[in-house]
Image (spheres, rainbow, N blue to C red):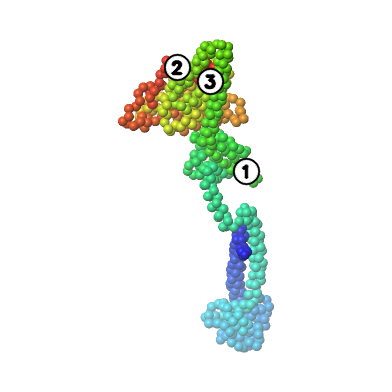
Amino acid sequence: MRLPHVPRPRSLAGQLFAMQAVLIAVVVAGCALFTYVSDRSQAEDAAGRQAEAVARSVADAPSVRAAIRTSDPTKLLQPYTTEVLSHTEVDFVTIMNPRGIRWTHPDTTLIGKHFLGHTARALRGEAFTETYTGSLGPSVRAVVPITDDGRIVGLVSAGIRVDVITARVQDQVAALLGVAAGALALGAVGTYVANARLRRHTHNMNATELSRMHDYHQAALHAVREGLLMLDGQFRVALINDGGRELLGVSGEVVGRSVAELGLPAPLTGALLASEPRTDEVHLTATRVLILNTSPVSGGERRGSVVTLRDVTELQSLMGELNSERGFTQALRSQAHEAANRLHTVVSLIELGRAEEAVDFATAELELAQALTDQVVAAVGEPVLAALLLGKAAQANERGVELVVSQDSRLDDGLLPSSLPARDLVTILGNLIDNAVDAAQGSTGARVTVTAFADGTGTATAAAHLVLRVSDTGAGVDPAHAEEVFERGWSTKPAGPGGRGLGLALVRQTVRRHEGTLRVTEAAGGGAEFEARIPLPTVSSAAAPDEEAPAGPGAAGTAGPREPAPDCAQHALPGGDA
């Protein structure tokens, strides 16, 4: 069964066109009616004034008063009124005696009969006008007294028929209707043009569809997790969704403000102010790693741009962990290769009949490797950092750089709070070591020194800090660039396929997220020294009040670095032949 066809609601442009057409028609009709009534009233007033002027002229004529004194006034007055009618635009001129008996009339059969109309006011000496239906039909007439030596000797009435006045007004109305029709046509054309443009802008949708689309737009805008930012042609914020506010860290009313006023990092602000499109650019804020895409709004002249933001902070951290795991794998592969070489050496010594030397060689290698691993674990008991150092040592060794742990290092397992996740430690220390290895590679006596310890008492008056210090034997950092090195994109190395200058920026972001500090200075033996200090919980928050804080230099929140064992003055990490 086919459903009956339901006509689609008229589009918004069509509704507005119909409304405007009706409005113009009503306005024009109203103006025409008002003009007709006004012109009719004005025409009647003008006719009254014209009739009164003619009647006064007749009443003031000396010949009229002279004729009235004769025994037959009609004989002289009738030709006179006929001549007056021929020279004026009135329809009748009637002269009568004070009793209202006509001496003249356009219809000679009515001469001598009583005047049809009011004369009382004229008999009192007052001229007046009125609309009255007389022998010639409805007319606008004036009645004026004729005086002679101060007494009223007769009356004059001049008038214009109403149908003549109507004919005059109809001519004016016809012209008015022509003008009104032209105005209506012009208004219709203008309305059609305006609504045709509106149809293009509204895609011929009706009001209900536009309202529904607005509701969908608002729902989608606030539901999408990605940040959405729309800028106008002057780079002012035209629209921003909840995700955009959260990712950019802005609050309050930002719509209408310039991008430069939002307090964003300089590289991110520059990307938003750029006229050319940006694709998958990585930018850092104080706490996030963002992927930015910009696209201009099409339409000829610059109308603005659409900006999308994706939060890849978690992804970037996972990539850092993956890179560390990949480094560990490469280190294990390198160590496996070295172990195979040592094993071949042991087998060859046995085959040569030098079993005792083979045992001594194998025992020495095992003791050395185990001793170095024990030294690292003893200095840095935190498992994540220890594993990271062991892996980075192997990588550095393959690049000809010696990675050592300084004698000041001491971190016990369980010292670090849960608020400082292992992922952040890998981000901070791993990137600092990678940066130091890059700087030291190729230098004389290439070496990277790592120091990690807890500094401070951890009391309410002296906060404890985790100190991670990495120094190298490279060329160092120009003091003028001490702040720039932490900006994204800054690097002294040639840009690779994935770009450079992101590692130190991520380090600073992570340190700031934990309310720590990061600085770079000149190392004691030349090169650069980077130091990250991250606050640790105080004793009051780290332990119960009735618990005794662990004593000794290795306790959590100890006052300064723990003294290492005498044979651990500086530990070269295992990663190659010792």
Per the model, the C-alpha gap separating discs 3 and 2 is 17 Å
Percent x, y for residue 229?
55, 43
> Residue at the spot x=58%, y=36% of the render?
281
Residue marked by disc 3: 575
82 up-or-down from 244: above or below: below
In the foreground, 67 or 247: 247
Residue marked by disc 1: 302
Q: In the rendering, which numbered label is found on residue 568?
A: 2
Percent x, y for residue 73?
63, 86
In the foreground, 315 or 262: 315
Q: Amino acid at mark 2?
A: Cys
**Is label 1 in a helix, a strand or a loop?**
loop
345 up-or-down from 499: above or below: above
129 up-or-down from 421: above or below: below
> Residue at the spot x=36%, y=29% of the render?
539
The answer to which image quadrant residue 412 occupies is top left
In the foreground, 70 or 317: 317
Q: Amino acid at mark 3?
A: Gly
**In the displayed structure image, the side of residue 466 where residue 311 appears, left or right:** right
